Amino acid sequence: MTFDLSRQCNRAATPLNIISKKELAKLLHVNERTIHRMVKDKRLPEPMRTVSGNNGGWLLTTILEWLKRQKGH
């Protein structure tokens, strides 16, 4: 996979740098269903959860670290 992090990460996703499933899918050039499968198959870190248990998104730093590890493989 090729990632264009310079375009996607020059902005703060939110004040806490949390990115949504939609934003992550765009970053990885896949659809949201693929993100769901990647998490289910443990190929992608688990998202943070809200108090009610819903997907709260990913910390940008978590995704950047994950991407660095992927490049090493």
Image (spheres, rainbow, N blue to C red):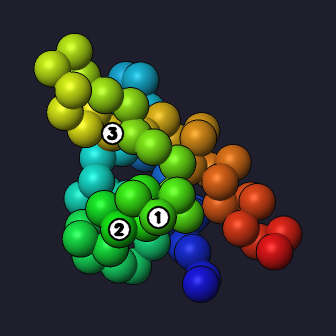
Nearer mark to the viewer, of 3 and 2:
2
Where residue 31 appears, as percent x and y from the top left, is 26, 76
In contact (CB < 8 Å): disc 1 and disc 2: yes
Q: Quadrant of residue 24?
A: bottom left
Label located before the other in sequence (3 or 2) = 2
In contact (CB < 8 Å): disc 3 and disc 2: no
Secondary element type, mark 3: strand
Marker count (numbered): 3
Secondary element type, mark 1: loop
Kind of residue at badge 3? Gly
Q: CA distance from mark 3 to mark 1?
A: 17 Å
Instruction: Return the residue found at the far front.
Output: 41
Nearer mark to the viewer, of 3 and 1:
1
Q: What label does residue 17 carry, if any?
A: none
> Residue at position x 65%, y 54% from top?
66
> Residue at position x 30%, y 62% from top?
36
Kind of residue at badge 2? Arg
Q: Is residue 72 left or right of residue 70?
A: right
Where residue 59 appears, as percent x and y from the top left, is 48, 35
Badge 2 is on which residue? 37
What is the quadrant of the N terminus in the image?
bottom right
Local crowd size for mark 2, using a 10 Å CA cut-off: few (<14), some (14–19), many (≥20):
few
Instruction: Return the residue found at the far top.
Output: 51
Secondary element type, mark 2: helix
Badge 1 is on which residue? 41
Q: What label does residue 57 carry, if any?
A: 3
Q: CA distance from mark 3 to mark 2?
A: 15 Å
